[in-house]
Image (spheres, rainbow, N blue to C red):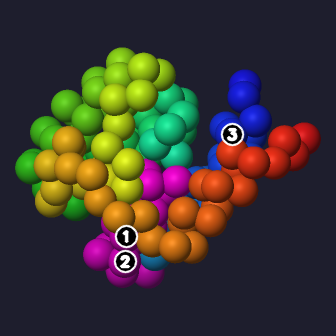
Amino acid sequence: MNSFYRNIKPHVEAQIDASTALVAVGQTADAFGNLERAHVLGQESTILHTRVHWAMLLWGVRHRDGKEVLGQLLRLVGAATKTAIGLVPQGNTGGTNVSPFKVMPIPPQLEQLIADAKKYNIR
């Protein structure tokens, strides 16, 4: 695994865990927001990008959101096949409420985490 993956993975997993905790207390909209942040953080890693879209798919299934389920199935294929060759729109939040091709601004806090993950080779 490359250093970016190792460095950013804890931040992605923290967002997924936070989403799970929010779902447990009925805050589903906020929970999806955590998945969107996880997507922005992990979208340059094929493994993490795919992992986040899987979590979004499960969110859609649990909430009986057919549009999200269908969109995430398509995005899973894209994440698994296009991430490694750099075909990801930076900052895109990954939900079906935005085009899968739309480049979006990265919030400064997330941008800093991404920059740090690329910069430091933490073991």
Q: CA distance from mark 2 to mark 3?
A: 27 Å
For the image shown, how many numbered marks are present on the structure?
3
Q: Nearer the viewer, residue 61 or 100?
A: 100
Q: Nearer the viewer, residue 113 or 32?
A: 113
Question: Sequence-wise, which precedes: disc 2 or disc 3?
Answer: 3
Residue 71 lies in the magenta-colored region = no
Q: Residues within 10 Å of mark 1 (few under 14, many from 20)?
A: some
Magenta stretch, residue numbers: 24-41
Q: CA distance from mark 1 to mark 3?
A: 23 Å
Q: Main secondary structure of the magenta part?
A: helix
Q: Which residue is mark 3?
A: 4
Task: Answer with left or right where residue 11 lies relative to residue 70.
Answer: right
Q: Residues within 10 Å of mark 2 (few under 14, many from 20)?
A: some
User: Residue at 72% of width from left, 28% of height from top?
Assistant: 2
Q: Nearer the viewer, residue 62 or 93?
A: 93
Question: Sequence-wise, which precedes: disc 1 or disc 3?
Answer: 3
Task: Work out which residue is located at the far left of the displayed protein and give it.
Answer: 67
User: Label 3 sits on what residue type?
Assistant: Phe
